[in-house]
Image (spheres, rainbow, N blue to C red):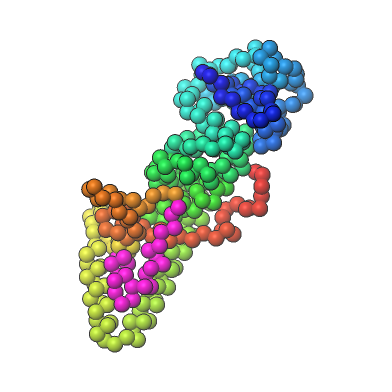
Amino acid sequence: MEPVKFLMPDFTPNTRLRVFGQDFHVHSSYLKLHSAFFRKFLDSPEKEIVATSSGFIYEWVTKVDEDGTWSLVWAGSAGKFGTVSGVGKFTSDQDAEISAFTIVLQAIYNWPFVIRSPAQLCLATKLADYYCTLPSLSRSLYGAFGRSPDFCNSIRGNIIDLLEVAVKLRNEILYRECMTLLMGPWNHPKYLMIKDKKLKQLAASAHHSICSKILMIQTFVMEETLGEDREVLKDFREQELDAITQNLYRNSDEVSSLCLPLLYRQLTNTHFGHHFAWLLRNHLTLYPAVRVEWGPFRTIAKPGDRDTWCEDYFLCLEIKDDELPWDSNEKDW
């Protein structure tokens, strides 16, 4: 394949990285600046720093280990410059590895890139972690999300994997997005499937914060209805009962349950509906919550809307900076 060249004005690439069948021409200074891995190993004492016949001072190639994983190694240790070692042992998708590694380098250079899928971001994060350049990838994502509609459309289907990626990258936008989506469906929230104990505890705490808000709002409504005249109270109770009756549905276990988001959306039309507005906010910024096709028309679905994916979702989760599960002041990790 044609080499991928990271060209900069007045700077000639002096390093060649060979990832399977793809060469990357890059600058050692950029690698050392943004990657603790290359800072440590690019100029380590056992490596002879001489220009190869290709003109590169540094040349690293792919080595596949016995367990089927791969890494870049100094070409001199491979016995022959330009050789890819043990490639037959690698049974995964080489193109996917090349694509993810390209994103890692683009993030180092702060060049724009597009994320095609959650799986690609997970793989790029794994590589960035190995080459100690997670901060570069995390910072670059803020611009990449806006260029990656296919990725954003796929977030909800890969939410738990992406939550772990968000924490590893310490990316606030992705973390808040994942946590918000994990709060639903309300009757059986997805956060219950998280295996990591710490993350599950954080998600449970977030879920409880919404429960607390629901209880507080219900208390306000009860206090206000008790102070109103009997006709207003009667009207409210009738509408509430009607909404509850309409919102009972049967799940696969034939057990009746109440869809609270849908109930509160219907109650917003009552005399006390303003109390429910906060719960029906949508704090998603990446996942298009909310676009729904109705025949030839496109409309915006909102939390609690009947017959939409967010019918049984509250998307109002708020996470403060001091509630993030990492030190926001730490610049390198």
Left or right, 322 with reference to 119: right
Per the rendered image, the range of residues in magenta is 263-285
Does the magenta run of residues contain 281? Answer: yes
Image-quadrant location for residue 13: top right
**Residue sitting nearer the eye, 99 or 119:** 99
The percent coordinates of residue 256 (x first, y second) are 25, 60
Q: Above or below — where is 269 with respect to 160?
A: below
The percent coordinates of residue 46 (x first, y second) are 75, 21
Count the marks: how many? 0
Q: Above or below — where is 323 with respect to 57?
A: below
Image-quadrant location for residue 244: bottom left
Q: Above or below — where is 11 with respect to 303?
A: above
Q: Residue at x 32, y 60 (%)?
A: 304
Q: Residue at x 62, y 53 (%)?
A: 328
Q: Residue at x 67, y 33 (%)?
A: 30
The percent coordinates of residue 142 (x first, y second) are 53, 46
Does the magenta run of residues contain 268? Answer: yes
Q: Residue furthest right?
A: 45
Q: Residue at x 26, y 86 (%)?
A: 230
Q: Quadrant of the C terminus?
A: top right
Q: Above or below — where is 203 with respect to 44?
A: below
Residue 224 visible here: yes
The percent coordinates of residue 64 (x first, y second) are 56, 21
**Residue sitting nearer the eye, 173 or 2:** 2
